[in-house]
Image (cartoon, coloured by chain):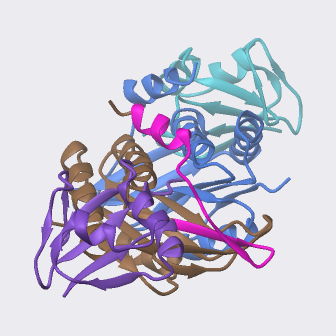
Chain colours: A purple, B cyan, C brown, D blue
Amino acid sequence: MARLVFLGRLTDLAGCAELEVAPGPLETVLAGLDPALALALLDERVRIALNGDLIGDRGVVLAAGDELAFLPPVSGG
Amino acid sequence: MARLVFLGRLTDLAGCAELEVAPGPLETVLAGLDPALALALLDERVRIALNGDLIGDRGVVLAAGDELAFLPPVSGG
Amino acid sequence: MADDVRLLTAAFDPAEELRRFTAAHPSAGGVVSFLGQVRQDDAVEALELQHYGPLTLPGMERLAGIVHSRWALDGILILHRSGVMRPAEPIVLVAAASRHRRDSFAAADFAMDHLKAESWFWKREQTGGVWRWIEPRPQDYADLDRWI
Amino acid sequence: MADDVRLLTAAFDPAEELRRFTAAHPSAGGVVSFLGQVRQDDAVEALELQHYGPLTLPGMERLAGIVHSRWALDGILILHRSGVMRPAEPIVLVAAASRHRRDSFAAADFAMDHLKAESWFWKREQTGGVWRWIEPRPQDYADLDRWI
């Protein structure tokens, strides 16, 4: 299995901080989620980090054991 | 009697922090001091305060009980 | 490296931390510090900061390195809370020690602007029993522009 | 008036003073402080600050009033030693508490520049057993020009 991690308001939207998902292309993984959550995760202001490293490309394929984090804009002030 | 107060390096030059002097015009008081000290007290960078208030005029006449302080430039930094 | 960067998940004592930091830098003429705390008079009942392990502390350490290389410092301290905090509880403590005070002032100011605008923390506040996530403010980005 | 201005003739504990000041201003989001201490690694064995009673503390109080009126502060703290100090002993502690951190940074910075350049203190240092009076440096006046 792979793991999705949701930060900030995405935690509330997902209803959990982490979610175990089957490995595979990110677009396939997202297609299996609640559509409102999937849409929020595709927001271009939400950055993603694969196993702790920020990546720019959302065409990622998740392998077993991977952790993909979704990072909305930080709160500042 | 009146009192002269010497601050900073003037303390060393006067050999004391305070000096009792007879009341009278400042120029008369200074004439009674060691000439090197009197010269240093007349340095225009040395400000003077009469009874705790800065004054600009050195033509002051000291009355009994007056305190006249000589303030060299402060040390800063 | 005389830097001390920590992500804390429990309450800390800023006065003691500052005493320790100052004692560790006896050759510094000056120490500038910034302490941020949860304001007590707002309607806010609690504040929660969320962090992401793999990114948050490494980002703070990278910031400390940048600050240290930009000014002539004896050392820098960056402590930041994560988790739930109540009014008057400390959130962040930044301190810079240097020979000349101008360096410490600029370093602490720079570190705070960048911590606030760029660190990986997500904040929510509880008001009237309801939690609400805080969005970034334009002011945070304007603060950063001062250093370009 | 939430200002605290003191001229101290004996050693003080900056960490405790800062703890007290911070606790007195729970509605301030931020507290900026500057602590100046006698440097330990110089050849200087001791430092003495001399003050003049009728002018020094009143001047510090006037400065606090100016700072308070110039920035939006919850309070300001100005503590300054007089007398003989040894290496690593605190000399001066300035702190400013405010809702927005930019005000505290500017207020503490301004207060330090003016304390250093304009306060009625005369300083001498002991090196190799010999005391030497310190003259003002051009840098102190340049610091003031930043605020005009």
Does residue D40 appear in this view? no
Does residue C131 appear in this view? yes
| Front-lying residue, A38 or D102 | A38
Image x and y of residue D95, in percent: 60, 56
What residue is shown at x 21% (from left), y 83% (from top)?
A22
What residue is shown at x 26% (from left), y 81% (from top)?
A3
Classify A63 as above or below C41.
below
What residue is shown at x 23% (from left), y 52% (from top)?
C68
Image x and y of residue D143, in percent: 46, 28
- Assess whether residue C139 is covered by the magenta stretch: yes
Classify C77 as above or below A75.
below
| Front-lying residue, A29 or C136 | A29
Answer with the quarter of the image where residue D120 lies. top right
Image x and y of residue D88, in percent: 36, 67
Relative side of D94 to A69, left or right: right
Relative side of D133 to D13, left or right: left
Answer with the quarter of the image where residue D47 lies. bottom left
| Front-lying residue, A42 or D89 | A42
**Quarter of the figure that contains the C terminus of chain B:** top left
Classify C48 as above or below B54.
below
- Assess whether residue C130 is covered by the magenta stretch: yes
Relative side of B62 to A77, left or right: right
Total residue callouts: 0
Bounds of the magenta span?
A: C123-145
Image x and y of residue D106, in percent: 57, 39
Classify C6 as above or below C138.
below
What residue is shown at x 43% (from left), y 58% (from top)?
A39
As drawn, which residue projects farthest toward the right? Answer: B64
**Quarter of the figure that contains the N terminus of chain B:** top right
| Front-lying residue, A11 or D4 | A11
